[in-house]
Amino acid sequence: MTQSALRMGAAPRVLPVSVVIASRNRPQLLDDTVASIVAGDDVPAEIVLIDQSDGLKCLDPQPARRAGCELRHLSSAVRGLSHARNEGAELARNSVIVFTDDDMTADRAWLRPLTGPLLAGEPRAVVTGRVLPGPVETPGGFVPALVGRDTPAAYAGRIDGDVLAGGNMAIARATLFEIGGFDARLGPGARFPAAEDNDLGFRLLENGCRIIYAPDAVLYHRAWRPPSAYLPLRYSYGKGKGGYYAKHFRFDDRYMLRRMATDLLLRGGRAAKRVRRPRLACGEIAYALGVLTGAVEWLISKPSASAWSAAAR
């Protein structure tokens, strides 16, 4: 019998961490995410909801309260995932902050392995976990991003890819502030609508931090998006990634340029291999076009940074 099963029916353990969730116009998904967190073997001391919805409908705080968790549901007029995460981090009352998304559901044992290294005093680290597919909830529904590796890992310095999953991560509040937070020019709701976690992970590694991968910290990404959203979402992901690459281009350092070239070659190869699966092949092409568009647009427009983003350059 697993430790999680042994704790079924027992009072949850309250951990001194704050979970920050950004949401916009998805109240039922948000409610389900919160319900899964407070049903865990461990619960956070608080959940901070930064809600950018057109009309705020606050969740019932009683289920969280019964589990020993304070639910703070706050309206925000500013748009964008990165803005919301930064705002939530500023308002959080605990020194360890967990970020997840409003279309995730948590495994009962999720929170402790995600926060354990930080609560134990791991210096200058961020912990990220596994993201598995949830059940298909609409005909042809899909999950846009997964992390399936089942072996622990730790990363430092320059690596060949991006390993931080922003929808399943824990970080010390002080480290997030030190690094400048999420860049509000990147991420859903921004002009470059993805790669805010890639950018944060890169800056953490460049500044001597470690990224710890804890596969036991499992979230399930819900497959609620209809097939019609697939190609636009792949393009948006690519555009954000292109902006991220261009942000870190340097004349005296070709590392990020090489990263982008490798990514584009990989997309082309995948498209060729998936020619008999047209939607997937077109998805790779849409992503590659997004990367090129995002990179060119960033270099031409040189988008200005917000107060937080200025520190994130």
Image: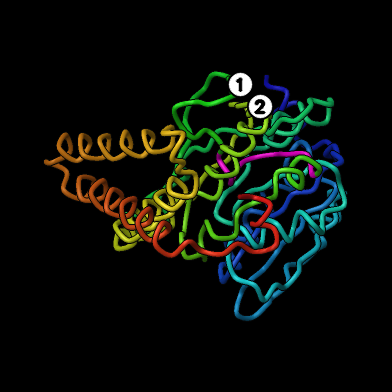
Q: Secondary structure at mark 1?
A: strand
Tag 2: amino acid: Arg
Q: Which residue does the numbered mark 2 point to in the structure image? A: 210
Q: Is residue 192 left or right of residue 278?
A: right
| Among the 4 quarters of the image, the one containing residue 73 | bottom right
Q: Nearer the viewer, residue 221 or 93?
A: 93
Tag 1: amino acid: Ala
- Residue at the image point whose x is 36% and y is 51% from the top: 238
Q: Is residue 244 left or right of residue 73?
A: left
The quarter in which the N terminus is drawn is top right
Q: Which residues are magenta?
A: 165-173
Q: Is residue 197 left or right of residue 246?
A: right
Residue 288 painted magenta: no
Q: Position of residue 8 (x, y in %)?
A: 75, 34
For disc 1, the neighbor class at 10 Å (few under 14, some 14 to 19, many from 20) is some
Q: Position of residue 10 (x, y in %)?
A: 83, 36
The residue at the far left in this view is: 276
